[in-house]
Image: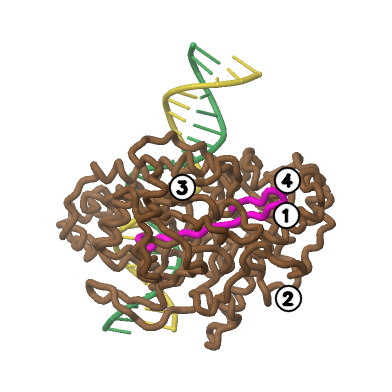
Chain colours: A brown, B green, C yellow
Amino acid sequence: MYVHEERPMLDYSYPLNPLTNNYGFYPQGNGMISHGEAELTSLPVHVALEGRELWDKFSNIGTEMLITKTGRRMFPSCKVTVTGLNPKVKYVVMMDMVPFDNNKYKWNRDHWELSGKSEPHLSSRFFIHPDSPALGERWMQYPISFHKLKLTNNTLNSNGLVILHSMHKYQPRLHIVQAPDPCRAQPGAYLRFTFPEAAFIAVTAYQNHEITKLKIDNNPFAKGFRDNGLNRKRFRDKDVQGKQGSGQQQSKTQSHQAGPSDSDEEADETVSSSVESHVLHSPDMKAPPTATSNPFISAFMNGGAGQQVWTQSPTSHQPQHTLNSNNRDSTRLSSLQYICASLPAGGRTLVAPQQQQDIQGIHSPAAHQAYPIQPDMDQSLPLPPKLSRVNLPENALRSLEMGSVLDHLNPWPLSNILNRIHARAEASGNAGKAVQGQPQHEQLPLVLERDTRPPFFPAAQDCGTTPYANQCSGPSEKPGGVISANKSICFQMISVRLIFVFVFSLATS
DNA sequence: TCCACTAGCACTTTTGAAGGGA
DNA sequence: ATCCCTTCAAAAGTGCTAGTGG
């Protein structure tokens, strides 16, 4: 199982709600928290995957997620409930996909079977939740939805998509990153949660008709295919001409009896109750006037825009002048989610209890008792505020891609980045004031000296035994793997730089 | 021939601008 | 001038399917 477990001492709770899995994190309060470790890791953080009923339906059949060149949303989408955060501390929440195993799959008539070894995993690209950063109380107020996360098989995409291999199995992974607090000169920590029950096989066309049927029944966008697709003109015409259904239509007829009634509500709730994601920009998007409403984006625009932007007033953002320009390079510059890649192996991965037992063979009922929960899943929550799409200035992203070639040889673990922020906060003396002066940032070298001081975070573990070995170990030995490995390194280089600016912006926002 | 993949289609939902009324 | 509500067209998200290429 591809779970990067760094601290076997971690404790996990059992599911507390029959419809959700709650993954709790309870560090043992016996002084095991290392020096300088941030508050996040000392909190009883619970994460629960919403819509377990639907996920289970898919999982029982064998979840498939369509991936396309232009990107396809997940259905069901990942929506999680988080509890146990510090309500007054800012966090960044993001998601990526990690390989479920080392295998490649193929569909054989009516079942999935193994089809050899998996392709080298492309470095992860994060989908950063648009509300990031936000206070813990906000994250706990509403379920956190990632329904706008898109999957693609296009390794060259520039539209903020998560890249996957077709016919490979993946599972979602949630990251909660504590924004560094400059005033307290304390670095941020982060937690990771994987969702094995949401594992899926990425496909370019649905293989299992049962999955297709489930999607049609539950996804409101696919309503037009309900009632055996007879709503559609094409099928109506065919019906009139003698009901000469296609193979797929026939297959639907075999089992499709359920109306849209119940599933409608379920699906509608899934789609409508979520928060809008921000897609930082694709060339065909208009720049909305609310582009700077997100403080993170504002911070990023200020903090990551490179020299050209440093000279601007923080309030002088003109989102309509950003990536939506006709600049021909804009197609390769897009969202932060897309560019952010490959979180290093420095965090803590929390897995489902059963999975945890598989790995470590441990139980922890005490944890459950210690923190009897938490979210009332039946309680209706107010709809979260909606956000408009936001854009990043092109030069902000471009400047981040410019850096030392050496960077890709030693990508920074997130912990190192946070340590560096901490060091910088210390060096600045009064970080809260220092960060107000934007020009100071301009003077920061893009390529910072490394490892000049001991880390405050646990150093990234050697990832040779993890599924991310491909990311960390450089070019693959396979001839075909060199290119993808180089791509991976390139993504890493960009992403680490972005993460740095991103987190640093958090510290200063 | 098989299989993975793509592009375009028809359909539905979502979004946001525009307009009108209080 | 502002706010709220309704309307409507465009954009975006679905699975389907014919066709392509290895």
State the CA–CA distance, disc 3 to disc 1: 29 Å
- Between label 4 and label 1, give the one nearer the viewer: 4
Q: Look at mark 3 in the image and give the residue it sits on.
A: A82
Q: Is residue A65 visible?
A: no
Which of the two marks, 2 or 3, is nearer to us in this view?
Answer: 3
Bounds of the magenta segment: A178-197
Secondary structure under badge 3? strand
Image mark 4: chain: A
Which residue in the structure is indicated by mark 4?
Answer: A183
Q: Quadrant of the N terminus of chain A?
A: bottom left
Residue at image position (48%, 37%) is A384
Judging from the image, mark 3 belongs to the subunit labelled: A
Q: Which residue is mark 1?
A: A304
Q: Name the residue tied to disc 2.
A: A406
Sequence-first tag of 4 and 1: 4
From the viewer's side, name the closer residue of A280 and A469.
A469
What secondary structure predominates along the stretch shown in magenta? loop
Q: A307 or A244, which lies in front?
A: A307
Q: Between marks 2 and 1, how big is the CA–CA gap?
A: 20 Å
Estimate the x, y position of residue A98 in percent, counting from the top left.
Answer: 47, 67
Structural distance between the alpha carbons of marks 4 and 1: 21 Å
A301 over C6 or under it: above or below: below
Mark 1 residue element = loop
Horizontally, is A113 left or right of A8 in the view?
Answer: left
Badge nearest the viewer, 3 or 4: 4
The answer to whether marks 3 and 1 sit on the same chain is yes
**Left or right of A245: which side holds C20?**
right
